[in-house]
Amino acid sequence: MNKITAKEVEKLINEGKTINIIDVREVHEVATGKISGAVNIPLGLIEFRMHELDKSKEYIIVCHSGGRSSRAVQFLESYGYNVINLIGGMLAWESETK
């Protein structure tokens, strides 16, 4: 499983890199704040919404602490998606949220 730290993601954002972030937390959790530009697809809906993702793109998957995103990464990888788990999830995120 590919992994990335919150600091590495923050650096990519600050450098103006185009990144795709999928937040797999529940809607009420995302309402408290998410990484700017992140798309919310709750873990329970990944199977039904993965058709919205482009297999030619790379996606960073985030949740609250890294557990749910890890499961989402394993699931999506099994279908051929290029996904990376954000280690520590939003608990590790120190930058701004929207």
Image: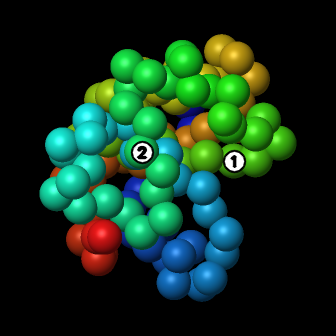
**Residue at image point 19% right, 45% down:** 29
In front of the other: label 2 or label 1?
2
> Taking the image as drawn, is residue 11 in sight?
yes
**Residue at image point 18% right, 43% down:** 28
Q: Which mark is residue 40?
A: 2
Residue 65, quarter of the rendered image = top left
Q: Nearer the viewer, residue 48 or 97?
A: 48
Q: Is residue 70 above or below residue 86?
A: above
Q: Which mark is residue 77?
A: none
Left or right: residue 31 versus residue 98 is left
What colour scheme has been applied to the protein in the rendered image? Answer: rainbow
Q: Position of residue 64 (x, y in %)?
A: 23, 43
Q: Which type of secondary structure does the marked residue at label 2 adopt?
A: strand
Report the amino acid beneath label 2: Asn
Report the amino acid beneath label 1: Glu
Q: Position of residue 69 (x, y in %)?
A: 39, 33
Q: Earlier in the sequence, mark 2 or mark 1?
A: 2
**Residue at image point 53% right, 76% down:** 13
- Outermost residue on the right side: it is 56
Q: Is residue 90 above or below residue 80?
A: below
Say if mark 2 contacts mark 1, CB within 8 Å.
no
- Graded by Cα atoms within 10 Å as few (under 14), some (14 to 19) or many (20 or more), the crowding at tag 2 reads many
Q: Which type of secondary structure does the marked residue at label 1 adopt?
A: strand
Q: Position of residue 55 (x, y in %)?
A: 78, 35
Determine which residue is flagged by label 1: 58
Q: CA distance from mark 2 to mark 1?
A: 16 Å
Left or right: residue 75 versus residue 70 is right
